[in-house]
Image (cartoon, rainbow, N blue to C red):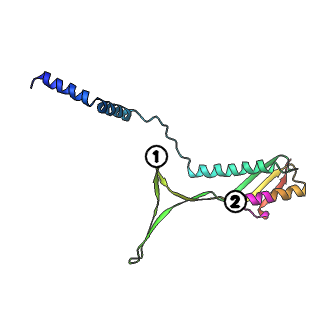
Amino acid sequence: MDMTAIGAKIVEFIKKYRYVILVLVIGIGLMALPDREETQQEPTTATVVSNSQTDQAEALTQILSQIRGAGKVKVLLTVAAGERTVYQTDQDTSTGSGSVRCETVIVTNADRAQQGLVQQIVAPEYRGAIVVCQGADDPNVRLAIVEAVANATGLGTNRISVLKMK
């Protein structure tokens, strides 16, 4: 075989399969490009808990300031136990040996990142609340604020202090 015969076969092959070759070349080119998506770090548990506490205090501040006669309001919530995430587990029990195997169910997302399957998010447990407002000298305003904070946080009324703002 001479070189012209080989060249002619190559040209014939390329003409016959030009679309397949084009798709392969484009696919290889796309795979060679760097991934342009920025990886975002998920916040740590401590960050999530502090953000949750801050959001709850801000939401209470906004709601309580809407109470007639309350005026300007500031809220401080103390936390006994922060927000907890409970993950789904898979349990196998063997009756013969009495052993129990418990594994967390792992889910893989589109970015191939693995994380546990969330079963439940347990709300934080509050230890107490301090509310400082301009209208705290009015007993009706105090009662309305104490009831609102108790309903929002689950605290007993003995754990909520309403004080007059200076």
The kind of residue tagged 2 is: Tyr
Q: Residue furthest top?
A: 4
Q: Secondary structure under badge 1? A: loop
Q: Which quadrant holds residue 31?
A: top left
Q: Position of residue 76 (x, y in %)?
A: 74, 52
In the image, is residue 14 above or below residue 144?
above
The answer to whether residue 20 is above or below residue 162 is: above
Q: Outermost residue, bottom direction?
A: 96
State whether the magenta stretch is mostly helix, strand or loop: helix
* Quadrant assignment for the N terminus: top left
Q: Is residue 82 rendered to the left or right of residue 26?
A: right
> In this view of the protein, which residue sits in the foreground, 63 or 10?
10
Could you give the CA–CA distance between mark 2 and mark 1, rounded to whole angstroms?
A: 37 Å
Task: Tell me what residue is drawn at x 77 percent, y 57 percent.
Answer: 149
Crowdedness near tag 1: few (<14), some (14–19) or many (≥20) residues, C-alpha within 10 Å? few
Residue visible at 59% across and 51% down? 46
Q: Vertical placement of 34 versus 8: above or below?
A: below
Q: Nearer the viewer, residue 89 or 159?
A: 89
Displayed quadrant of residue 6: top left
Q: Residue 77 placed where, x, y %?
A: 72, 55
Q: Is residue 164 magenta?
A: no
At x 87% / y 53%, what residue is drawn?
136
Left/right of residue 131 with respect to residue 12 in the rendered view: right
Q: Which residue is mark 1?
A: 110
Q: Describe residue 28's horizontal placement relative to residue 44 as left or right.
A: left
Depth order, front residue of 17/44: 17
Query: Magenta residues, as a range?
Result: 147-157
Give left or right: position of 158 versus 17: right
How far across and how far down the image is residue 8, in percent? 17, 24
Find residue 122 and name its label. none
